[in-house]
Amino acid sequence: MKEKLVSIKNLSAGTKYKQILNNISFDIYAGEILCLLGQSGSGKTMTASAILNILPENVEKTSGRILYGEKEFHSGIYGSYISSIMQNPAACFDNVFTMEEQIKDILKANNKDYSQEKMCNILEKVSLTNQQDILNSYPYQLSGGMLQRVMIAVALSLESRVIIADEPTSDLDVLGQREILDLILKLKNENSAVLMITHNLSVVKHMADRIIVMENGSIVDDFNKDELHNNKRHPYTQKLIKANESQYINKWNISFGEYNAKM
C-alpha cells in the first residue's frame, strides 16, 4: 500500500468578494507524479499555494484541513518535507546576491552540507557545466532554463518528500521544456512524490501517473493516466482533450500533439 504524504480534506478558500477553491479533497502518495490539469483561473496554483501555506494576503482558507503525513503545518515542513519549483525562476532568486550565497543559505537552513564541493555536485546532477562560474554569477546573468535547473538541483539536494512544480516549463523553448521535464522525473522515487501543475495535456501524457482536473475552483475529475480517454470522463475533461487535439490538426494529418507527448 502506497504511503500517503499529503492529504487535503474539504479545502475551501477565497477573498472577501469571491470564492476561489470549493471543497477540494485529494491525497498525494509516495512514488507518483500527480498532475493538476485545467485552464488558467481554474484554481490550480491557488491549491498549490494553500498546500505550501503561502496564500496571498487577500485570500484566506475558509474551511478544511491539510495534513503533511499525519501532522498539521509547521515551519519545519518547508524544505525537509515539502518544497517547490516555481513557474518563473527569475522571481525566486534575489539579484543582489550571488547564486552561491543563495544556494548556501537554503542548504544551511535545512541542515544540509553547504560546502562549495557539495554545491558544485548538485549543479552537476542537473547537467550544469562550469559550476563555479554559475555559483559566482548573479541570477540576472543566467538564463531562465539555467535558473530552473538550479531550482531542481536544490529540490534534489533537500530530499523533500513532496515537490510541487507549478508550470515549470511555461517560459522555456521546446528543447528546454524536454530537458526540464526529464529532470523532474528524477525527483520522483519510491519515497517522494511530485505534484505538477499544468494546462498542457501533452505534458500530462508524458509525466503523470494520476490526473486531477479542475474547473472553476472545483475538482471535476480524478483518474489514472491510462483512463484519460475513457468515455466516462467528465465533459470538461473531454473538452480539454478535444481542444488539445484540435490544436495540432493540419492538412498532412500529422499528430504533433502525440509527438510532443513523447518528447
Image: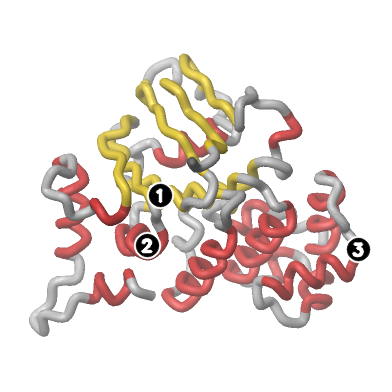
**What residue sits right under mark 1 in the picture?**
35
| Measured Cα–Cα span from mark 2 to mark 3 | 35 Å
Instruction: Name the residue type under label 2.
Output: Val
Q: Residue furthest front?
A: 1
Sequence-wise, the earlier of marks 2 and 3 is 3
Secondary structure, mark 3, is loop
Tell me, yes or no, whether the two marked residues, 1 and 2, touch with CB atoms within 8 Å.
yes
Q: Secondary structure at mark 2?
A: helix
Residue 38 position in % (x across, y down)? 31, 45
Residue 122 in percent (x, y) is at: 75, 67
* Residue occupied by mark 2: 203
Q: Is residue 4 left or right of residue 131?
A: left
Residue at left 24%, top 51%?
A: 227
Q: CA distance from mark 1 to mark 3?
A: 35 Å
Kind of residue at badge 3 = Ser
**Image-based side of 31 in relation to 113, left or right:** left
Q: Quadrant of residue 209?
A: bottom left
Q: Is residue 123 left or right of residue 241?
A: right
Q: Which amino acid type is shown beneath numbered disc 1?
A: Cys
Residue tagged 3: 115
- Quick one: label 1, few (<14), some, or many (20+) residues within 10 Å? many
Q: Which mark is residue 77?
A: none
Q: Residue furthest right?
A: 115
Which element type, helix, strand or loop, lies under badge 1?
strand
